[in-house]
Image: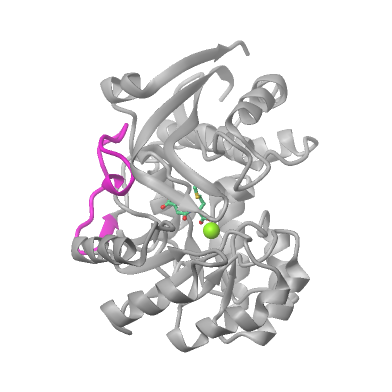
Amino acid sequence: MKLTGVELHRIEMPLVAPFRTSFGTQTTRTSLLVRAVGTDSEGWGECVAMADPLYSSEYVDGAADVLRRFFVPALAAVERLDAAAVGPALVRFHGHRMAKAALETAVLDAELRAGNRSLSRELGAVHDRVPAGVSVGIMASVPQLLEAVGNYLDEGYLRIKLKIEPGWDIEPVTAVRERFGDDVLLQVDANTAYTVADARHLARLDPFDLLLIEQPLDEEDVLGHAELARQIRTPVCLDESITSARAAAAAIRLGACSIINVKPGRVGGYLEARRIHDVCVAHGVPVWCGGMLETGLGRAANVALAALPGFTLPGDTSASSRYYQTDITAPFTLIDGHLQVPTGPGIGVEPLQAELDAVTTSVERLAV
Ligand code: SMG
Ligand code: MG
């Protein structure tokens, strides 16, 4: 296809509850949606950058800028555009993987819709539903945390992830294990809040039989993770550090992780995410699908990815109601702790016009 237009839709959606991590508290999700219009179809991609560069160096205004000034003009020059052509067309531009991923996903959605093919089939999904985990923020008190975890377990979530930071780690994990028992699938995510000097402290999590500890150290500290992995029994999982299939292969080889969190936005798109899956399967390293508080658009695509055979752990693929009162697509709901994998053409969902309009703060139409 040939690109005939691109729109950047900026949206603001209130979260059902504040979400606190080691890098800050979020009450609203500000995101950018990319709509790509081609000669015979159109598609959507959700940019997972946050309003501020706190999780990674990317942020919403930066993503809009790089899309507008560099990425969209580069794609507009491609005569026979498909998703596989996006990476090569943008490869000379460094970084900005979340912005690249959003644009590639919009093109992929359009391409698949034109061919009446679903993303799940395209990626090689082998399941029609995926188990849902939930990420639980840092709370003001242990009783509040126990209430939140209890409610999620009652809803049917099959795995609990606790956000941790220095001062909120051993105590909440102990309390959750004491209240809900050893059978709950439990893991923690530090979002880079520790240093390798904390190894002995983090080893105090060993007795709790956690599935994994996610990104305890700085994203560039791959060797530190390898050192930490030798000093603790809890398996180390990387999130922020894994920005490509090459980075995944290196981290595995160096012993920096034994599990990998795959987020398509963080790695530049679903095609690279699948390559990471393949690298991990080849090394016997389990993967699971992370989350970035996506709307139903991004969630639909994540759920398709999470249905690949190497995704053997539940992901941060929660129901729409975990995040938003009203989603901008038909909501994802939990059925026996699982989300259904969309089977329609492309990513399998579309924004509902009224719901989208209600949260849209600006639409920018880019000339191509
Ligand atoms: O989408 O359920 C979700 C959020 C899952 O904890 C989550 N994401 O580091 O894995 C992570 C964080 C990054 C976003 S925090 C605002
Ligand atoms: Mg994480």
Q: Is residue 316 magenta?
A: no
Q: Is residue 72 above or below residue 266?
A: above
Q: Looking at the rendering, in which quadrant would you find the C terminus?
A: top right
Q: Looking at the rendering, in which quadrant would you find the N terminus?
A: top right
Where's residue 262, x and y in %? 54, 58
Residues rendered magenta in the picture = 320-339
Tell me if I can see residue 215 in this picture: yes
**In the image, farthest residue toward the right:** 92
Where's residue 201, x and y in %? 60, 80
Secondary structure mainly formed by the magenta segment: loop
Where's residue 101, x and y in %? 59, 40
Q: Is residue 143 above or below residue 291?
A: below
Image quadrant where residue 330 sits: top left
Left or right of residue 244, residue 101 in this image: left
Which residue is at the front of the view, 46 or 138?
138
Image quadrant where residue 157 sits: bottom left
- The residue sitting at 48% across, 15% down in the picture is 363
Count of numbered badges drawn on the protein: 0
Tell me if I can see residue 310 in this picture: no
Left or right of residue 240, residue 130 in this image: left
- The residue sitting at 49% across, 67% down in the picture is 168
Give the colour scheme of this rendering: one colour
Q: Is residue 361 above or below residue 335?
A: above
Q: Is residue 326 magenta?
A: yes
- The residue sitting at 37% across, 62% down in the picture is 141
Which residue is at the front of the view, 250 or 17?
17
Where's residue 316, x and y in %? 41, 58
